């Protein structure tokens, strides 16, 4: 009897509404077909939806990740040398006792400033967000050291806050249908998504007659699909071209002076710089051509087109800003948007590189706004919840985590870090200079990692705690960066092996540290509270049960969102949230900071490791490290289906390849003073001469000679950050040779 019953249930396939929780630029609604405790098939959004949100290739392969044979299934402790990758299975009791013991030991021996907590973008949802749980725990434990600065988009965030006082600089994607000209300036949404429906609306905009131009050192997939024209450009020189476009507009009287007079401050200072009155150098198209490799006549034509075809959307993004002076590119883009009067106008754009709209956006990810969130770090206490005031001791820039571990107080950092606990990141692989990171991790007294896989960073752990995937728990998510919708991740399967969620791990650790009442609510109680008590979702999602059942709540907007529409309609009543109340082309706040690499008006300047650096003689190729189509950073790396989609290769132009005797498919080395990677060459005219490109996220795998056979991009990048705080991931010089 019993067996029969069991068979019946096992054969039943249930369909669970969920999403993944990746930091991937999209959010695909998924229908997971579950049989027993296995996801056997994945379907996407309902086909009947008029604007069906098409599922990406990564989500279609999601079950291959959840059920991957290499998932970590039980706690382990180190059994060989640090980094050797040898581990021994232990029980959860032993594991949690060990972590509690180490936390107490470090606190008593060195103080809380010896404890470092590293969190990342591995899991973007509201409740099981490990950062929140662990931040809260360690705050109640007396404090800790952590990182500041956004690894992704600090350049764009800095630029948008400086220029507009806001990070909400985007338009609804369907507003591109109102555009007559769309400039993809370092933007490749076919690969990095920028909202699940972005390519759909971009293709529709093209069909609707918009002209599309791509400006990028690579002829990328979006350009290949929709662009009428590709303007190749040298990395790090966009600001020079933009400044020269401003020159053309000023000289030809094409700029919108009345818009500038009404809505901006500081155009005069910018104009003095452009015309050379400030430094004696007139920023002509010929000047910019010399720097950027873009033909002067092309710059003139582009300036005229952009100034006269209205409305026009200049779409800058974050990749070019992840560089030595990247924020200048976003500020200068925003300045051109103002010079052409495209800010706050349907079919236009505000620039600034972030593209987010306020409904369902990641920057508003915590489901409850400041002061109301029971997980709040330093906001007021919420009645009936816990004391969770943050007592972070000190902070370190995100691209300097490993430098801080290595050099501590002597190197000018706030403290000497003795132990680290990592969750939701693979920073050894994902921040600059992986070889240095590996050295730093060897120096720690203790390193604990919560993970799903034996990542390059997890190999360096003393203690490995296995974590559930987002299919094994329920949560709330949102698209990043463009909605407008909210999603509910329903738990599809029970936790695999001995995996636990970070929240459960932290809760059990709290008991061992003598911290009371750490997690008083059930998963469902938390989620219900997040939805119903949130002033943003509360009024929109009246029926929690329906939301949960359907897995998605689509918001019907009366018209597309246009950033700063209210300001442009009535600047007196709705000033910009900047000190002047206007768009700040000149920023007094920046002038006051007086940082040599952070001018108060947007400027082109040369930087270390650009083509003017003497190092260029030794390492004459500029390295780009864009985001991978077949992964989310280093996640999904193990999924075989996705590896087949795009083998890991270095893009290199035939001119550079021939000069080095490299043929398509050859094994080559790329190297500089920081490291050396071995990789297969893809000889292609889709990248300009003088530039090579490898996608970030491939797993660091040094052999005995120290050659990274995994060809992780960050074996070659540096751990620098720009004046505006951007991680410098796209300003590295390298050389190539046949292996
Ligand atoms: N060279 C170069 N480097 C870059 C970039 C670049 O353009 N060039 N881009 C940068 C950008 S924009 C970003 S956002 C970063 C991303 O950097 P990271 O945040 O380090 O990104 P991931 O590689 O996605 O690593 C996330 C890890 O979290 C784990 N994980 C997933 N879910 C959970 C969970 O619930 N709990 C726990 N404990 N772990 C979980 C995954 O298994 C994975 O190993 O990379 C940056 N690095
Ligand atoms: N499939 C997938 N999608 C993702 C991610 C992922 O890992 N995988 N990551 C997500 C995350 S966290 C983020 S932050 C975003 C990142 O989105 P972005 O930061 O915009 O993406 P990147 O791939 O770094 O760069 C975009 C383009 O900029 C170009 N570029 C680089 N340097 C320059 C330059 O100096 N000038 C010009 N004109 N172009 C340049 C590159 O060739 C590339 O085509 O993507 C998100 N989407
Ligand atoms: Mo990112």
Image (cartoon, rainbow, N blue to C red):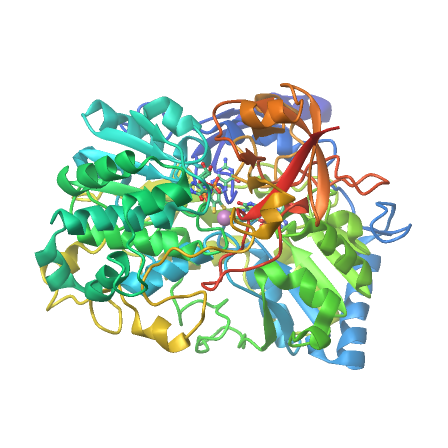
Q: Position of residue 177 (x, y in %)?
A: 20, 33
Quick check: 649 above or below 623? above
For the question of whether residue 408 can be seen, the reply is yes
User: Residue drawn at (63%, 29%), measured in percent from left and top?
Assistant: 648
Q: Residue 304's image quarter?
A: top left
The residue at the far front in this view is: 280
Image: 152 above or below 138: above
User: For residue 604, what is the image quadrant?
Assistant: bottom left
In the image, residue 274 lies at what x, y percent? 26, 57
Q: Is residue 447 left or right of residue 151?
A: right
Q: Quadrant of the N terminus?
A: top right
Q: Residue furthest right?
A: 80
Residue 133: percent from left, percent from top? 59, 62
Give the quadrant of residue 651. top right
State the residue in front, 370 or 232. 232
Q: Is residue 210 above or below residue 483?
A: above
Question: Front-most of 366 and 546?
Answer: 366
Residue 176 in view in this figure: no
Which residue is pictured at 81% across the width and 80% down the height? 109
The one of 711 and 281 positioned closer to us in this rendering? 281
Q: Quadrant of the C terminus?
A: top right
> In the image, what residue occupies the spot 35% across and 74% down?
591
In the picture, measured across the screen, residue 312 lies left or right of residue 605, that is: left
Q: How many marks?
A: 0
């Amino acid at each position: 009897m019993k067996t029969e019953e069991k068979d019946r249930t096992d054969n039943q396939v249930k369909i669970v509404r969920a999403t993944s929780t990746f930091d991937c630029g999209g959010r695909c609604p998924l229908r997971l077909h579950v049989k027993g405790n296995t996801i056997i098939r994945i379907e996407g959004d309902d086909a009947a939806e008029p604007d069906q949100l098409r599922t990406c290739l990564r989500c279609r392969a999601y079950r291959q990740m959840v059920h991957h044979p290499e998932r970590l299934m039980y706690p382990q402790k180190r059994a060989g040398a640090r980094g050797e990758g040898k581990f021994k299975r232990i029980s959860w009791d032993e594991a949690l006792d060990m972590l509690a013991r180490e936390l107490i030991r470090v606190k008593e021996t060195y103080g809380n400033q010896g404890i470092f907590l590293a969190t990342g973008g591995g899991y973007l949802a509201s409740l099981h967000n490990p950062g929140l749980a662990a931040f809260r725990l360690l705050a109640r434990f007396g404090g800790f050291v952590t990182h500041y600065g956004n690894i992704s988009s600090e350049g764009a965030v800095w630029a948008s806050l400086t220029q507009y006082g806001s990070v909400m600089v985007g338009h609804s994607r369907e507003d591109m249908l109102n555009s007559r000209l769309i400039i993809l300036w370092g933007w490749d949404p076919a690969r990095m998504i920028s909202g699940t429906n972005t390519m759909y609306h971009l293709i529709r905009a093209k069909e609707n007659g918009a002209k599309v131009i791509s400006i990028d050192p690579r002829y990328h997939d979006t350009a290949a699909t929709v662009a009428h024209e590709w303007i190749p450009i040298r990395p790090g020189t966009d600001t020079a071209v933009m400044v020269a476009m401003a020159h053309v507009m000023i000289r030809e009287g094409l700029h919108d002076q009345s818009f500038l007079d009404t809505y901006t401050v500081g155009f005069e200072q910018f104009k003095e710089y452009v015309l050379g009155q400030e430094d004696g150098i007139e920023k002509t198209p010929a000047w910019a051509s010399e720097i950027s490799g873009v033909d002067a006549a092309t710059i003139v034509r582009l300036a005229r087109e952009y100034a006269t075809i209205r409305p026009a959307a200049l779409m800058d993004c974050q990749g070019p800003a992840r560089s030595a002076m990247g924020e200048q590119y976003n500020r200068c883009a925003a300045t051109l948007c103002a010079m052409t009067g495209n800010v706050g106008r349907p079919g236009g754009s505000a620039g600034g590189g972030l593209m987010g709209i306020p409904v369902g956006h990641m920057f508003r990810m915590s489901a409850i706004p400041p002061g109301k969130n029971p997980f709040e770090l330093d906001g007021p206490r919420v009645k009936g919840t816990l004391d969770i005031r943050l007592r972070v001791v000190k902070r370190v820039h995100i691209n300097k985590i490993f430098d801080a571990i290595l050099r501590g107080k002597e190197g000018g950092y706030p403290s000497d870090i003795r132990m680290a606990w990592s969750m939701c990141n693979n920073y050894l692989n994902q921040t600059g200079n992986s070889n240095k990171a590996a050295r730093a991790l060897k120096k720690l007294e203790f390193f604990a990692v919560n993970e799903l896989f034996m990542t390059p960073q997890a190999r360096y752990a003393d203690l490995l705690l296995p974590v559930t995937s987002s299919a094994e728990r329920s949560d709330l998510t949102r698209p990043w960066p463009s909605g407008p919708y909210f999603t509910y991740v329903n738990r599809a399967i029970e936790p695999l092996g001995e995996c636990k969620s970070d929240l459960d791990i932290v809760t059990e650790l709290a008991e061992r540290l003598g911290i009371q009442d750490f997690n008083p609510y059930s998963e469902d109680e938390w989620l219900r509270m997040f939805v119903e008590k949130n002033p943003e979702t509360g009024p929109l999602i009246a029926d929690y049960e329906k939301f949960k059942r359907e897995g998605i709540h689509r918001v019907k907007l009366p018209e597309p969102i246009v950033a700063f529409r209210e300001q442009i309609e009535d600047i007196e009543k709705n000033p910009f949230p900047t000190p002047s109340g206007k768009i700040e082309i000149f920023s007094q706040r920046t002038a006051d900071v007086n940082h040599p690499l952070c001018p108060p008006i947007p400027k082109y300047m040369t930087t270390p490791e650009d083509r003017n650096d003497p190092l260029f003689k030794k390492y004459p190729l500029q390295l780009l490290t864009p985001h991978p189509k077949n992964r989310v950073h280093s996640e999904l790396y193990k999924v075989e289906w996705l590896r087949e989609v795009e083998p890991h290769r270095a893009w290199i132009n035939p001119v550079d390849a021939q000069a080095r005797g490299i043929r398509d498919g050859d094994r080559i080395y790329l190297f500089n003073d920081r490291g050396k990677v071995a990789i297969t060459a893809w000889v292609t005219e889709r990248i300009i001469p003088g530039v090579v490109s490898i996608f970030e996220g491939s797993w660091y795998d040094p052999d005995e000679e120290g050659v990274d056979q995994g060809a992780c991009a960050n074996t070659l990048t540096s751990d620098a950050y720009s004046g505006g705080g951007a991680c410098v991931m796209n300003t590295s010089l390298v050389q190539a040779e046949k292996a």
